[in-house]
Amino acid sequence: RVRGVWFCPGSDLRSPFSAVCGQPRLTLNRLVKGQDTVPGEFPWQASIQWRGVHMCGGSLINDEWVVTAAHCFFQVQNLTQYRVVLGAHQLLKPGPSACACPVQRIITNPRYAGQTTSGDIALVQLGRRLNFTDYILPICLPDASVHFPPGKVCWVTGWGHVRSWVDLPSPQTLQKLKVPIIDSKTCRILYLTNMQNRLPHRNIQDDMICAGYAEGMRDACNGDSGGPMACIVGDVWVLAGIVSWGEGCTIKNRPGVYSRLTSYQSWIREYIPNLEKQLMSINAIGQGPGKTSSGLLCSVLGT
């Protein structure tokens, strides 16, 4: 155990039950006012840590892989200095539901060439396979058939700053933010607005998806990088985007920019051959819990 976090247990036994991705097991009230989450609300949320300190978010996509942003590892350090914490609700008081996993491998997309460029996605292979619990479950991945239309409401989660360079206060409870999808054309126009004394123009590429508010005030921020933008499709949670970049935090006309997951299925398949069993396809929408679909089922290991 390290700093109140249990090391993740592993097992080679198959569970007698099956888990469906993108479906938290706990019954939750999603209308609670405020930005604090409740334990188990987003069980795929990961904290990627370097030397025991949170640096980026991530999303659990099966029992041994986490997806995050490539810019979190622009200069990969010694793998033994990284760990991935799962099942945590409060970073400073993780509780018995949390566990820390060593990192076996980090794979960054070869297209990534620095901040705001395409290819801001990375895969992190855990050092051992996980046992799923009520607080540790994978999120579904979308295949290319899944469309996230402008205006669709999604959720961004993370332990990042509450505003530029202001830490989330102790005990650092996982935060959630409701954001609407913004179409790429509108997003490009917003980033061209008020360019005086701004950073050089940053183009919105096809593998990016924008979400947030033109008026600012609500946005992902430092420390949220690599974390999920999750949307409900049918009746399951699907990973639509990965927190990638923006201009500052909560700045007017500068919505958040996310790596678009539908653009990277072929690349992910290179490293996770059984991805087809985890993809959320347009044909699987609305099947509901307990119904089988090759687009929904995730592998589960026994406890």
Image (spheres, rainbow, N blue to C red):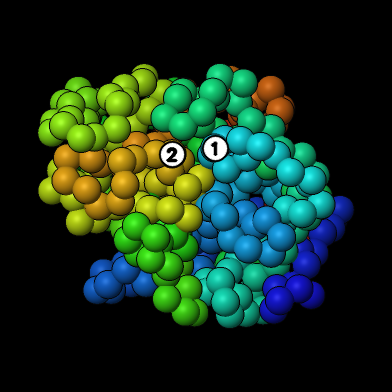
Pointer 1 with pointer 2, Cβ within 8 A: yes
Which comes sooner in the sequence, label 1 or label 2?
Answer: 1
Residue at the right extreme?
Answer: 12
Q: Position of residue 144 (x, y in %)?
A: 44, 23
Residue at image location 62% in from the left, 54% down from the top:
48
Q: Is residue 4 above or below residue 255?
A: below
Residue at image location 86% in from the left, 53% down from the top:
12
Residue at image location 57% in from the left, 77% down from the top:
92
Q: Position of residue 64 (x, y in %)?
A: 72, 47
296 or 1, nearer to the observer: 1
Q: Is residue 5 left or right of residue 238?
A: right
Q: Position of residue 125 (x, y in %)?
A: 73, 42
The quadrant in which the N terminus is found is: bottom right
Residue 220 in view: yes
Q: Is residue 61 left or right of residue 211?
A: right
Local SS, label 1 = helix
Local SS, label 2 = strand
> Residue 277: which numbered mark, if any?
none
282 or 262, nearer to the observer: 262
> Which residue type does callout 1 highlight?
His
Residue 86 in view: no
Q: Is residue 255 above or below residue 111?
A: below
Residue behind mark 2: 244
